[in-house]
Image (cartoon, rainbow, N blue to C red):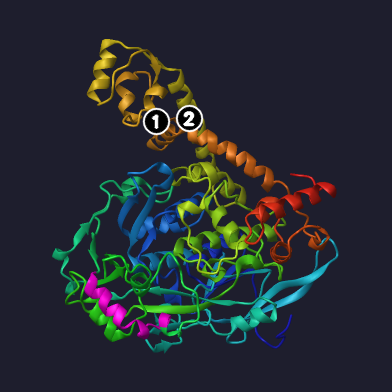
Amino acid sequence: MSNNNAYHIRTDVCVIGAGHAGCEAALATARLGLKTVIFTMNTDSIAMMPCNPHIGGSSKGHLVREIDALGGEMGKNIDKTFIQSKMLNKSKGPAVHSLRTQADKAAYSASMRQVLEQEPNLEIRQAEVINLLVEDKEDESGAVHPAICGVVVHTGTVYECKAAIICTGTYLNARCLVGESITETGPGGMQRSTSLRDALERLGITTRRFKTGTPARMDGRTLDYSKMTIQKGDDVVIPFSYSTDPKDVQIDQVPCYLTYTNEETHRIIRENIDRSPIYAGIIEGTGPRYCPSIEDKVVKFSEKERHQVFIEPEGLSTNEVYVDGMSSSMPDDVQQRMYRTVPGLENCVIVKNAYAIEYDCINANILKQSLETKAVDGLFCAGQFNGSSGYEEAAAQGLMAGINTALKLRGEEPLILKRSEAYIGVLIDDLVSKDNREPYRMMTSRAEYRLMLRQDNADLRLRHYGYRAGLITKEQDEYVSYKEEHIAKEIERLKNTKVGAAASTQEYLRSIGTSELKTGVSLAELLCRPEITYDMLSGIDPDRKPLEKAITEQVEIGIKYEGYIERQKKQIEQFEKLENKKIPAGIDYDDVLSLRLEARQKLKEIRPSSIGQASRMSGVTPADVAVLLVYLEKVQVPSV
């Protein structure tokens, strides 16, 4: 341990950064009994939403539900602070239903800070971490490698620790750009972190530059909403958290509004495209493909006559609105002109300019699937620092990093969620296995088994894991077992309950808008009809017992999609065979003859833990996988 003359403080875990990843990581380790310190550049930035003012959305809503099922905080916090809620994709199947809520940004941040402050094992510290301290550690095999033993803050104080989690978000060597104006700050004008990159490089951990952007914020009083289309929330709000009483989220909601860009907007952008830092070559970082700036949209989708623009309130205590769909890094004068071409925005007053932000992050290939670095024992990474984008992706990683930090310090195996078990499993596997050259965004299309990974069954899939880790109570876990039992019993009852073609039955079926029976069928067979719901069957099902909505919802989905679900279960069985074929940690890929050079290099770099992970790596072909399988058979590596 260096810095012997400095003031030393002992703790168990240091969490660097207090954004969405840092908050979940610190709460997890603290709640699992570890003394934790969370560092932030500014306490006002705890759980800050520097970009969009919403939580959830397509696939991201799945992540929030999974975070909650495992014992995380994001779902509970947004249930307390949302101002509008909507279930997306309701016209499609349940696999892609996704909850999305508008947040009161200030309230969300304040509420999360209060949760952190009330956690007994957690200390908040406003300070910049400038160095990471390591010491040599011998593992069970006798090999010696570096292990984290402390962090140093800008005042010189040393925090001795057993593990650290880096969650720097977009603050590391950040700079914000508006045209040719560049300010060396983090998001929202917050102080950036500058010294940690050098500390990482001393440990052999290199960084790269990514970029993201955000739209302007406007004074909502200066907009003409009569020229826009109102966007209301759902009449009946469904909470994110399984712990939230649905009655508590039935609130008076705030509307959003929809408008569009037009040819005049696009003309102004095209005429000034050389003044955009993106196209002038000023920006070095790679931006997110699935959240492009308005100038990117105009250039890359030149055939489109207009693009959607959503006006979203930032909270109940402010007039500021967020102009979703028009992120930009154009100069101030261009922003003033282009925004005012949009219907309803003709007299808009910009409170905060749109800007692009560049920052340092890592290639997550340097991480194990537990999110621990391969280079330094006990050093974990989470959130946008890992090359992802979005609050929800960050929070999911933070929770998993926190859980796995605690499990490591308890001497237990890490919690690794499979792609077949959770969107979180897909997210982390994609980050650590693939060569992601742009900010990674979660999408339903990335999940091969999305029919099994629905947002409505996150508790059934993951609650038991949360209980085993220690973040879910025994009562919560037992309720899931109760729910599973009653779902199975009710499905079986519906399959075994027959109805005939009696006149009263035929009349009832006509009354609910479905065709009559030609022969006797089970209630389950009737429920397979698209137009029939579980509740509709009550008129010809006198023996049914009252069941919770959460149970009957699963019963209905289980019966209607039984064939598809069974088919996906068989696909998962095949997937499991490859996942269970483990690759020895010390394998010498130079001994595996017939591997292509690119595959050998990638396998050496990432060192996948299983054939399944190897098969998903960039640069590894099915032929390479076949060669690996033959080699593993030859050296007799067993499946687990």
Residue nearer the viewer, 262 or 453: 262
Helix or strand or loop: what does disc 1 sit on?
loop
Residue 563 image point, x, y percent: 49, 31
Q: CA distance from mark 2 to mark 1?
A: 9 Å
Q: Is residue 581 left or right of residue 59?
A: right
- The residue lying furthest to the top in this view is 502
Identify which amino acid the numbered label 2 is placed on. Answer: His
Residue 237 shown in magenta: no
According to the picture, the residue beneath numbered tag 1 turns out to be 547
Helix or strand or loop: what does disc 2 sit on?
helix
* Residue at the image position 51 percent from the left and 31 percent from the top: 485
* Residue at the image position 56 percent from the left and 68 percent from the top: 386
Residue 269 shown in magenta: yes
Magenta segment, which residues?
Answer: 262-279
Q: Residues within 10 Å of mark 1 (few under 14, many from 20)?
A: few
280 to 86, vertically: above or below: below
* Residue at the image position 37 percent from the left and 49 percent from the top: 239
Identify which amino acid the numbered label 1 is placed on. Answer: Leu
- The residue lying furthest to the front in this view is 303
* Quadrant that contains the N terminus: bottom right
- The residue lying furthest to the left in this view is 226
Residue nearer the viewer, 82 or 384: 384
According to the picture, the residue beneath numbered tag 2 turns out to be 486
**Main SS of the magenta segment?**
helix
Residue 400 image point, x, y percent: 58, 58
Q: Earlier in the sequence, mark 2 or mark 1?
A: 2
* Quadrant that contains the C terminus: top right
> Can residue 174 be seen?
yes
198 to 464, vertically: above or below: below
2 and 1 marks in contact (CB < 8 Å): yes
Q: Residues within 10 Å of mark 2 (few under 14, many from 20)?
A: some
Residue nearer the viewer, 8 or 75: 75
